[in-house]
Image: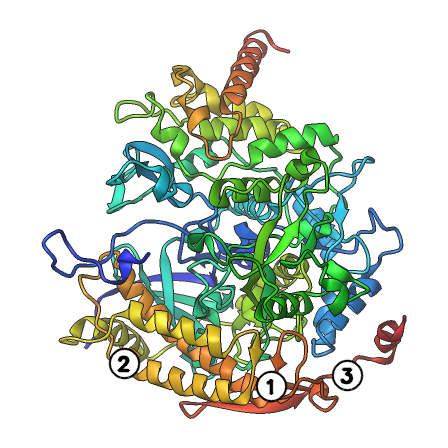
Amino acid sequence: MEVAKDPKTRDGRRTSPVVYDRACLEEVCGSCAMRVNGVARMACTALIDSLAQPVKLEPLAKFPVVRDLSVDRSSMFESLKRVKAWVPIDGTYDLGPGPRMAESERAYAYELSKCITCGNCLEVCPQVNDRSSFMGAAPISQVALFNRHPTGRMLAAERLDALMGEGGLDECGNAQNCVRACPKSIPLTTSIAEMFRATTAHGFRKLFGS
Amino acid sequence: MSRPYETREHDVLVVGAGGAGLRAAIEALARGASVGVVCKSLLGKAHTVMAEGGIAAAMANVDPADDWRAHFRDTMRGGKFLNNWRMAQIHAQEAPDRVRELEQWGALFDRTADGDILQRAFGGHTFKRLCHVGDRTGLEMIRTLQDRGVQMGFHVYMECAVTKLLTDGDRVCGAVGYWREQGRFVVFRAKSVVLATGGIGKAWKITSNSWEYTGDGMALAFDAGAELVDMEFVQFHPTGMVWPPGVQGLLVTEAVRGEGGVLRNRLGERFMERYDPEKLDLSTRDVVARAIYTEVREGRGTEHGGAFLDISQKPAEYVKRKLPSMYHQFLELADVDITKGPMEVGPTCHYMMGGVRVDAETAETSVPGLYAAGEVAAGLHGANRLGGNSLSDLLVFGRRAGLAAAERAGRTGPGAFDERQIDEATAEMLAFFERPDGESPYAVHRDLTETMQSLVGIFRNRDDLESGLAKIREFRDRWDRIRVEGSRLFNPGWHLARDLKAMLTVSEAVARSALRREESRGAHSRTDFARSDPTWGKKNIVVKRVGGAMELSERPVPEPPPDLKTILEAP
């Protein structure tokens, strides 16, 4: 931020400040994902002292670059729409308290709900590339979240269908980079495994009737 | 000469995509309106995600004695009775429904043993009242609202900033903005406009607020002729990080104290015993912030100029479970394990109680067709906000604003505006590039934040406020000379130059209101008028643009009806 106040090029000419997305600076909003010394991570928690100098900053490579370090991650929202990542309820009238959940069940679901759509899991996934339409770990884990919600479950079959379609689970290559890159430590690979089981069962049900 | 621009048309335009904006959009959509949401950053990244402690709602899940009356009374007492009583009443009555609704939509609140929503204690609340999701309530709230909005199909215009409201006679009928990415102009035509742009923290040097908090909505409303109120009341949260410098101001949630954290000075004294022997660490925010500030000023502060906040007496597992992000935040950013040792904390500019004056029922401003909800609006919190009351504010009044805006859109036609308004707005934006040489927007901003911090901060007096105002006027002259380098393509310097205009307007309103109120009340502390004055306790200060200039007036605080008075007088 100090650099932004009077940015200069290498040969000392004044220029416009470097563009990057950021909002919270405390790793909850998910805006500032970029490659820092080649590693995909949130820039806000990358402390300069602990990095090799000079620090090299690059935009995420799996998304279209808007400018400098800012990328367009709208594809992630499109994936959320594809897997219907919401609890289906009509209107906004008062329905009374929501469904009850056991604390242990809620606590696990909350781990999944911490996703900040930063895009790091897609960035590190070898299967997410120009030649594939793989949606990546984030939306798959959101299916695991909503399919365990007592009301969200109503769309479970449709979500599993979406995961079984193009760009879905089939394209996961099990590299397991996603779970290591996630800044919120979401058990992404556990979600993926769970969804493999669920889609397999769903596939059989569809084939033979339930 | 008309510059090229694109046009978008909606029934309702919502400016801001935090809790209030999203809730307003959802409600307007549910009423069948076509809704556009404009936000400066990306969807789901609004400042609300940073809210930690919880949503205050008298659900009585933990303390069965709680009810809306007690919540209403706490809110009014916290606000030193300068609140709009009707807003406080509606808020207390409707907050539980809004929480249940979020739960229906999939928000994963912490649970009691019986499976109900768990509630925690917070400063100024008589009962355990804050519905929470660990210490990341805001994130869960935004995720839920965002998923809901995506399902309902709202149009979100991301990375777009509004610079001016368009008017047709006295009503608002749209807005002019620009895409931050390409720098091109866009005109939104709308039958009603909801402002949900949040606060003004970025005008201070030490703040917990995100970069988006530049007072945009307050300045837009002011420019369109709407009234602002209570602008002297700026909340300094008592506990922000003070070390290391890069994270100075970052919030340390009040939930740390709600869960049993204790404040001590360098000598190990539990100093809150001296400032509020009854409520101690859970006194209201204004009191705790001044206590820490005073301890530091009198030489009993920590090495880096703060106080110690200690929760390490609680079991480590408990701390990690109830305050996971505080644990993470201190470990990652300050190399402190809060389960083993104390945190260093100090006051940070956190919340604006003042803002656009609105009608309690509809959230409509004094300008027809313009609505405001959330931090940009004023009235609910009076002279000081209680923790947890802002998230419930966003939900209760966000919904009401969306409802009224959609209702209005159903009975009015699109207004007609004079194209010259657009020309003026675009010319103002382009002028930054046309000056041969001039001020850097960053330098003006830095000087403004230093002035607001030192002269319009926690403790105020006439001399400071007068010299602060003189400086703000200087900054305004410098703003006229700002030159921006580069092009309109995603240019942060250009964006800041625009945001600065709003910050200067709002800063002036804050400083002038603070100078006018010659007493100390809630978050407003005058060292030259250290006591509360009962005559001032019956007046709000209203700020309005009259013939191009800012004018202040005093307005009597509306009296609550007898039945509510009885509630307020209860012990």
Percent across and percent down for residue B440 are 25, 70
Taking the image as shown, residue B29 lies to the left or right of residue B181, namely right
In space, the residues marked 2 and 1 are separated at their CA atoms by 29 Å
Q: Subunit of mark 2?
A: B
For the residue pair B562 and B477, the one nearer the viewer reads as B477
Q: Identify the residue under disc 1.
A: B541
Q: Identify the residue under disc 2.
A: B480
For the residue pair B196 and A78, the one nearer the viewer reads as B196
Q: Nearer the viewer, mark 2 or mark 3?
A: 2
Q: Quadrant of residue A78?
A: top left
Amino acid type at image mark 3: Glu
**Residue at coordinates 59% horizontally, 56% vertically from top-left?**
B27
Amino acid type at image mark 1: Ile
Q: Secondary structure at mark 3?
A: loop
Task: Name the quarter where the C terminus of chain B is drawn.
Answer: bottom right
**Residue at coordinates 14% horizontally, 54% vertically from top-left?**
A9
Mark 3 or 1, nearer chain start:
1
Task: Name the quarter where the N terminus of chain B is drawn.
Answer: bottom left
Q: Residues within 10 Å of mark 3 (few under 14, many from 20)?
A: some
Q: Identify the residue under disc 3.
A: B559
